[in-house]
């Protein structure tokens, strides 16, 4: 498998008291999940919300013009980040397995 992730920076938004380590962890997990992207990543952003009931992590990714959004809530930001990564990987696998997958525009 060829890595076609993006060297583009991840845009990060935070709400509440989010430690820098949690932000770094979330960006690393998002980047690891994007290694499974079926097409080039055009843009990605992540929101870490420690002010919500339960800690929440949202990831938005534009892959070859297709927008993908996943979110997760956990007891800690690390737990929410791990769940977000699992959900994003699952979504990317489903996109890649579609019989009509033509996100890259090739026929």
Image: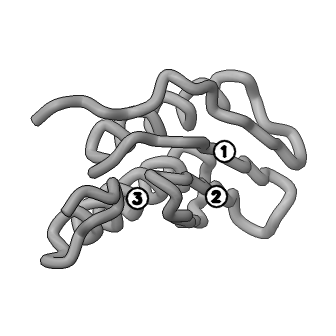
Of 27 and 2, the residue lying toward us: 2
Percent x, y of residue 33: 36, 43
Residue matched to label 3: 88
Q: Is residue 37 left or right of residue 1?
A: right
- Gap between marks 2 and 1, in whole Å? 8 Å
Give the quarter of the figure containing the C terminus. bottom left
Q: Earlier in the sequence, mark 2 or mark 3?
A: 2
Q: Position of residue 67 (x, y in %)?
A: 55, 64
Viewer-closest of 22 and 9 = 9
Q: Does residue 95 lie above or below 42 as drawn?
A: below
Asked if residue 22 can be seen in this view, the reply is no
- Few, some or many C-alpha atoms within 10 Å of disc 1 (few <14, some 14-19, many ≥20)? some
* Number of numbered discs visible in the structure rendering: 3
Residue in the image at 30% along x and 37% along y: 35
Residue 59 image point, x, y percent: 59, 54
Of circles 2 and 1, which is in front? 1
Q: CA distance from mark 2 to mark 3?
A: 10 Å
Q: Which residue carries the number 2 mark?
A: 58
Is residue 57 visible from the viewing direction of this image?
yes
Q: Please tell me in which quadrant of the rendered image residue 93 appears.
A: bottom left
- Residue 15 badge: none
Q: Residue furthest bottom?
A: 99
Q: Is residue 24 above or below residue 79?
A: above
Residue position for label 1 = 45
- Contact between marks 2 and 1 (CB within 8 A): the answer is no
Q: Secondary structure at mark 3?
A: helix
Q: Residue at x 45, y 52 (%)?
A: 64
Q: Earlier in the sequence, mark 1 or mark 3?
A: 1
Left or right? Give the position of 37 relative to 71.
Answer: left
Q: Tell whether label 3 touches label 1 (CB within 8 Å).
A: no
């Amino acid at each position: 498998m060829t890595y076609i992730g993006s060297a583009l920076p991840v845009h990060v938004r935070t709400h509440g008291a989010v430690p820098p380590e949690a932000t770094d962890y979330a960006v690393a997990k998002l980047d690891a999940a994007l290694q499974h992207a079926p097409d080039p990543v055009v843009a990605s952003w992540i929101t870490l919300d420690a002010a919500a009931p339960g800690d929440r992590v949202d990831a938005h990714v534009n892959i070859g013009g297709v927008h993908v959004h996943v979110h997760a809530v956990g007891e800690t930001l690390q737990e929410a980040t791990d769940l977000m990564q699992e959900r994003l990987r699952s979504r990317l696998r489903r996109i890649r397995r579609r019989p009509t997958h033509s996100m890259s525009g090739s026929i």
